[in-house]
Amino acid sequence: PSGQVPSVVAPSSAESNTALNIFSEDIPYGEESRKYRRTVYDFDAWKKHRSQDRFWRNMSTIASSGIYRGLLNEVGAVSAVAALAIVWNGLANGFTDFDGVTHEAIINGLPKLTLPMSVFTVTSPSLGLLLVFRTNASYERWDGARKMWGLMINRSRDVVRMGAQWYAPGTEKSGFLEEGAPLAEIDEEVKAEKLNRLSKSVWSFSRALARHLTPPDEDEEQFQKDVRERLEPTQAEALIASDHRPNRAMYDIGCAINDLPMHFMRRNQMDLDVAHFEDISGGCERIFGTPVPLVYSRHTARYLTAYLLMLPLGLYSGFGDSWNHIALVPSVAAIS
């Protein structure tokens, strides 16, 4: 159903790419669930999105949130550091048992694991700037991809519209009918066949581009099924066998346009829209193949990881009123 993310059962042969894979899940939930998070809104979705009950609905689904499930390893690591700090400081400085009796240090000479909060106060502005830049860059990439896809939809409609509107036998040479010349009879079956070929070729470009930007194990089988169902066998097999399927689809569009009876100036105008498909394909490949500079991404990840892993040491003293500082663990888990 729309809006629901199914549970993930990862194949055992996959190689994990999670840095802190505490629960040894072969394919991380966040990676596997990406295919279900390509949201396109309609009227009902917008109505639900701006509903006055959205606050309570969002709060009630925290336990099943995909974001928190994707961050489970990282949150677990920070919580483990907090638990380690509690145990270490209990051994080094004493602890309180369940009966409320305070005991002396078990191991004398151990240093206390704490940090002054001023360390985090000084470094938090720079961390904020790094995260803001990272967020802006990520949104810019997402917005750029959505604009590319929207432009492709617009150009696809335009090509099909011009093909249907300018289909005019007898105007190939002059672009118009000579004065007094009889109107060329249009074979409606031939017209429908040629325009149908054009529309299916235009569809094949968007489908081929979607497959081109999707992992093979996720979409290859469905792609071949869709293509064979909609296109002529020769065209379908040529598209499937092509090394660069979007380019092959553009070639098929050009052939379909050349087969339409119209003046060459109008055909050239249609070809200009097809040329935009090349720009769209290249733009999508640029976004797909060029991440945010890895030096910046790694620096931000290391900075944030070090900040969060050391945060329990800075907050430790502030939880002295709780039993053995135990409230530190859920607090840093919520913060991280």
Image (cartoon, rainbow, N blue to C red):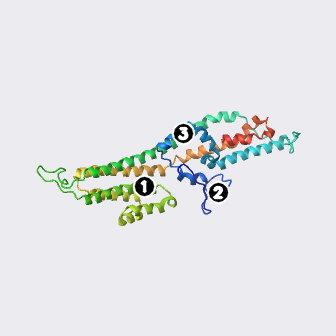
Where is residue 48? Give x, y as percent: 52, 41
Q: CA distance from mark 2 to mark 3?
A: 31 Å
Visible residue check, residue 32: yes
Q: Secondary structure at mark 1?
A: helix
Q: Quadrant of the C terminus?
A: top right
Visible residue check, residue 110: no
Q: Is residue 216 above or below residue 66?
A: below
Q: Secondary structure at mark 2?
A: loop
Which of the two marks, 2 or 3, is nearer to us in this view?
2
Which of the 4 image quarters holds residue 252? Answer: bottom left
> How many numbered tags mark residues here?
3
In the image, what residue type sits under mark 2? Glu
Where is residue 316? Give x, y as percent: 75, 38
In the rendered structure, the answer to whether residue 258 lies left or right of residue 217 reads: left
Q: Residues within 10 Å of mark 1 (few under 14, many from 20)?
A: many
Q: Earlier in the sequence, mark 3 or mark 1?
A: 3
Q: Earlier in the sequence, mark 2 or mark 3?
A: 2
Where is residue 63? Give x, y as percent: 65, 46
In the image, what residue type sits under mark 3? Phe
The answer to whether the residues at label 2 and label 3 have Cβ atoms under 8 Å apart is: no
Q: Which mark is residue 25?
A: 2
In the image, what residue type sits under mark 1? Leu
Q: Residues within 10 Å of mark 3 (few under 14, many from 20)?
A: few
What residue is drawn where x is 59% and y is 47%? 298
Q: Which mark is residue 209?
A: 1
Depth order, front residue of 284/263? 263
Q: Residues within 10 Å of mark 2 (few under 14, many from 20)?
A: some
Depth order, front residue of 206/272? 206
Q: Which residue is mark 3?
A: 133
In the rendered structure, the answer to whether residue 297 lies left or right of residue 144 reads: right
Q: Which mark is residue 141?
A: none
Q: CA distance from mark 2 to mark 1?
A: 31 Å
